[in-house]
Amino acid sequence: MAEVSIIVPVYNVEKYLSFCLDSLVNQTFKDIEIICVNDGSTDTSPVILEHYARLDKRIKIINKSNGGLSSARNAGMDAAGGKYLSFVDADDFVSHFLVEKARDFIKIGRADFVSFMFYSVIGKHLKMLKHYISFDKAIDGKVITETELPGRFYFEIHPTAWCKFYSSSLINENGLRFKENMIFEDLPFAAEVYLLAKRMVFTNMTPYFYRVLREGSILDKKDAKDLDLVKSFSYVDKIFKEHYKFEKYKNALMHFNMMLAVHDFSKINPEYREKFFYALKDYFSKFDFRAYDGKALEKSKNYRIISLILSCNYSAFCKAVKNYV
Ligand code: UDP
Ligand code: MG
């Protein structure tokens, strides 16, 4: 049984898959299984997978009908046998030292979760942008518990499933899986992991390369699934409340959610914008903003937009922010 399981959900990524698999088979730490879940691809991705699996026995293929990213990752988790677990999207790629470094952090620190930083890769020419936040020295690479972290910290971690490394016991003992039939599934998963992990490492190392808004990617599609964002906000709030951590993190959660809401509002398919507007109105109207850090809200451009959403109907809002949408 391999020590590390890497789960790769695969759906119509023929242009990028070899790049991803090359980065995985060439890891400096060799005792890995690469579980590729072909989620009903209709392009040549399955042929590429078969080719790589013939060359490298550590590659395992699971074929299933299309069920979306969450269902693919969950199928991979069900099949994973490693002591440690990581997710790499099939259109992304990683540095050859990712597993070795992650394993060192987790073993030396007796941690159950490691979170890396990443580069955003834009376009064919691999233009790279570093994530905008970096951890300060007191946190970077150190083992830390959630209680040691300030409330604002949740705003600083990037709540994706990828560019992270997990002990399988953290995942399996808590029965963690991705919520199916929705996008933004990473947000509740990341919240659970963050609150359940006993010892964590956050590092500024950047061994993950994320392809931003790839043509045909989930976040590039402008469909009704964008409305899932509001659903995911409620799931995340519920998780923080269940762990009695909502009060500590509520300001960070609010700013994070406002940022995502405003960002998505500007890019959502106009066909769904009105529905999204009312879903946001409904969600944000549940909060008493007087109980939040007023100075931070005052400075926030996102809060100004959310306040307008709360005080206007859709057509008045559109008139007020004509240049925005
Ligand atoms: N994916 C999948 N099933 C789907 C859609 C996507 O398994 O129905 C995979 C896809 O191949 C990739 C990962 O899920 O490995 C993330 O998808 P995508 O790159 O489209 O998402 P984004 O980068 O926009 O978050
Ligand atoms: Mg992608």
Image (cartoon, helix red, strand yellow):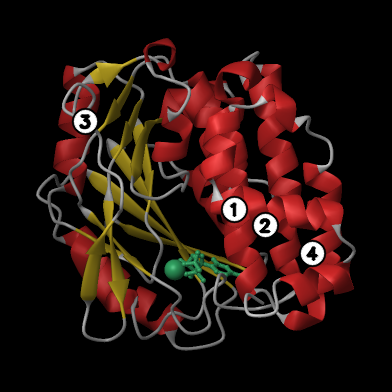
Camera sees residue 74: no
Mark with earlier residue (3, 1): 3
**What residue sits right under mark 2 in the picture?**
305
Q: Residues within 10 Å of mark 4 (few under 14, many from 20)?
A: many
* Label disc, if present, on residue 52 of the rendered structure: none
Residue 252 sits above or below residue 198 on the image: below
Q: Amino acid at mark 3?
A: Asp
- Quadrant location of the N terminus in the rendered image: top left
**What residue sits right under mark 1 in the picture?**
302
Q: Residue at x 61, y 46 (%)?
A: 257
Q: Residue at x 52, y 35 (%)?
A: 296
Residue 72 sits above or below residue 149 on the image: below
**What residue sits right under mark 3 in the picture?**
136
Q: Within 8 Å of ligand 1, the CB of disc 3?
A: no
**What residue sits right under mark 4 in the picture?**
276
Q: Amino acid at mark 1?
A: Asn
Circle 1 — which element? helix
